[in-house]
Amino acid sequence: MHPALSAAIDGLLVAGVYALMSSGLTLVFGVMRLINVAQAAFVVLGGYLSYMLWENTGLDPFVGLIVTMPALFCLGVFVERAFISRLQRERLLMSLLATFALAIAIQGLLDVVFSTDFVKIPVAYATDTFAVAGFLIPKVYVLAFAMSVLILTGLYLLLHRTTFGRTVRATMENPLGASLIGVDLPRVSAIAFGVGTALAAAGGAALVTTTAIHGASWYGLVPTLLAIVILGGLGSISGALVASVILLVAESVTAAVWSPVWATTVPYVVLILVLLVRPQGITGPREVRAQ
Amino acid sequence: VKSGRTSWYARCRAIAVLSAVAAFGIAGAGCGGSDSNGGSDDGGETGAAESTDPIVVGASLSLSGEFSDQGEAVKRGYELWADHVNEQGGLLGRQVELKILSDASSPEQVVTNYEQLITRDEVDVLLGPFSTGLSKPASVVAHRHQYAFFSGLAGGPEIVEQGFPEVLNVAIDGSTLMNGFGEWVLAAPEPPATAAYLVLDNDFTIPITESVKGVLEGGGVETVVDELYPPDLSDFAALARKASDADADVVVLGSAFEETIAFVQAFVQQQYNPKAVITVQGPDFGSAFAEALGEENAAGVLAGATWNAELQTPGNEEFVDLYVAAYGGSPAEIVDFTAMAYSTGEVVAQVVEAAQSLEQEQLIEAAHAGEFETITGPVKLDEQGLNTAATGITLQWQDGAPAIVLPEEFANATFEYPKADWGG
């Protein structure tokens, strides 16, 4: 198989993990117009919760989502009510500071509880592969990608097929108008933030199954997650998936065909080029207009 | 040291900081500022032995930011050393008190902190921060104030290449960490014919891998893959595939811990079984390594390292006991940064006792003149401040623990080469 094609497949599979991690970030921005830097720390926290469940009960991290996603949903609602909703002025700037502080607090908590050692869940299928046309495909990434598509589809249906989803989309499109027609903005914001945080739990489960993490791992995730959200279009769930694929495939192909030195640069060049043509991102406003 | 995430922009920032330090120094000189190179008010040229005030030992550590985990490990080492010294009666009959500032992993803050430690806090002894990238700007500050700079966490060559007499780099010369491995496999019954190098673009990892590459190429081993990669790479499978497609006999990883895990996992997935895989960070992280990969895939992986709990060096067993008593867990969980920090303290203690003074000039002189024993091995500093006495060790994951396989005088297990296939 040509190195570029095999690298593209590698990148595509990893993209599923990043789509999960970034989807909550874009949802929160769409509804609340704030950048939740702590999303990356929530992802790491979700990874640790999955690890804790696996270590104590042997529960598979993907099955464990039935516990970790509701847990982080509740945490997200609490955080929104306790901290985010209290930001009245300069919300965008203050949210950056507040969520950055929150991320540091989460890291500190993880360091105290779990120490600063790396953790990873060595599930039996982490190194299992199956061959397609002679190409060995890791099962764990296929599982993570499938879960990503499943959860993001569920989120899409939630937003487009339910009354709650309509209120969320109305809020995303026009918060003032939504409040005038009776949408309970504080409630919608709290639930949206909770859903975003729950999505971080799913991303964390995929991350800790494929990568060794520790409390400070969130630092390295922030630039990539922000790039995905911007490229996909702020507030666009489907855009997050598409942008993840574009950026991760670009990175892998660059590493394989050209040089790894440029592997993390080329995706940002792609980001700039796309934004020159579509400043709103790949799918962001179109999705909103369609609502 | 094994910072793992230093990048080109971090180096640019470091250059900017160095420029700022230089400008600050010129401005300071212009204002007639004077250096306080005698330490705190009580710890100067005279009276060091008479005072009963604590000896203040200052350091800046990365207690937040991207090196916060490593910073915490170093802090443990410094604190264990200080507690141990105090239990033994202190230095020069005085207790040791640590003054630790947090630099948030920032070169700019490191400079500010060492300025504060020297000019405002007037500490008696300076210990270095974590990583080569942060130690370099810190050493510039120490040099300007003519303060002895005891650095134990800067394995890269840059800090000693500055030629500052104040730099006392206790750390093992990082560039030699894998050379013993290279020389050994060349003499093995089935020496490798080809090698692949996958290296993080980092001040610490590049000298190590370049050095062992020189050894292997000198012995006729062909380099078939030689790739530098940037920090924060998301997908390691594509890069791992380069080594597996080339079917290199030996893989040399200049990678941080989590990257080593990603590479080995990718090798297993790609069913690629080299004769040897050696890394900068992996088995030396103890039980976390096998927990991340599974015992069957951790087995046989090698690491060039500075320290191990089983190392038969003076005081090492006592250090391990102190650590476990203070923090719990098992010896396999002790991070080598903690040991390196502790050994830096050990050198400080021996230098202070040799100098019988806290005067900086005498500390520098005594540090260059003496030979010292530490838990990470012997220390003998040359005129550049490079530790020429220490040699690294080679660890190999065997039977659920990192075994010392090289050098032979420290070995507690036989080098398994070629390693068994993944999965046992």
Image (cartoon, rainbow, N blue to C red):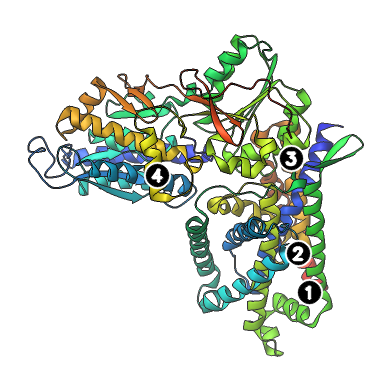
* Distance Cα–Cα, label 1 vs label 4: 53 Å
**For residue A79, which quarter of the picture?**
bottom right
In this rendering, does residue A214 appear at all? yes
Q: Are marks 1 and 4 in contact (CB under 8 Å)?
A: no
Circle nearer the N terminus (3, 2):
2
Q: Is residue B114 left or right of residue A137?
A: left
Mark 3–mark 2 Cα distance, whole angstroms, equals 23 Å
At x 66% / y 10%, what residue is drawn? B189
* Res. A159 mark: 1
Residue beneath disc 3: A252
Mark nearer the viewer, 4 or 2? 4
Q: Which of A255 and B321 lies nearest the eye of the viewer?
A: B321
Residue B392 lies, in percent from the top left, at 47, 24
Name the kind of residue labelled 4 in the image.
Tyr
Residue B223 position in % (x across, y down): 67, 17
For mark 2, what is the residue?
Answer: A237
Asked whether B326 or A277 is in front, the reply is: B326
Q: Are marks 1 and 3 on the same chain?
A: yes
Q: Earlier in the sequence, mark 1 or mark 3?
A: 1
Three-letter residue code for mark 2 = Ile
The percent coordinates of residue B240 (x first, y second) are 72, 33
Q: Please determine whether, in this image, residue B14 is positioned above or below residue A19.
A: above
In which chain is the residue bearing label 2? A
- Residue in the image at 46% along x and 29% along y: B306
Cβ atoms at labels 1 and 3 below 8 Å apart: no
Q: Are marks 3 and 4 on the same chain?
A: no
Query: Dot 3, how many residues are within 10 Å of its Cα: few (below 14), some (14-19), or many (20+)?
Result: many
Q: Label 1 marks which chain's residue?
A: A
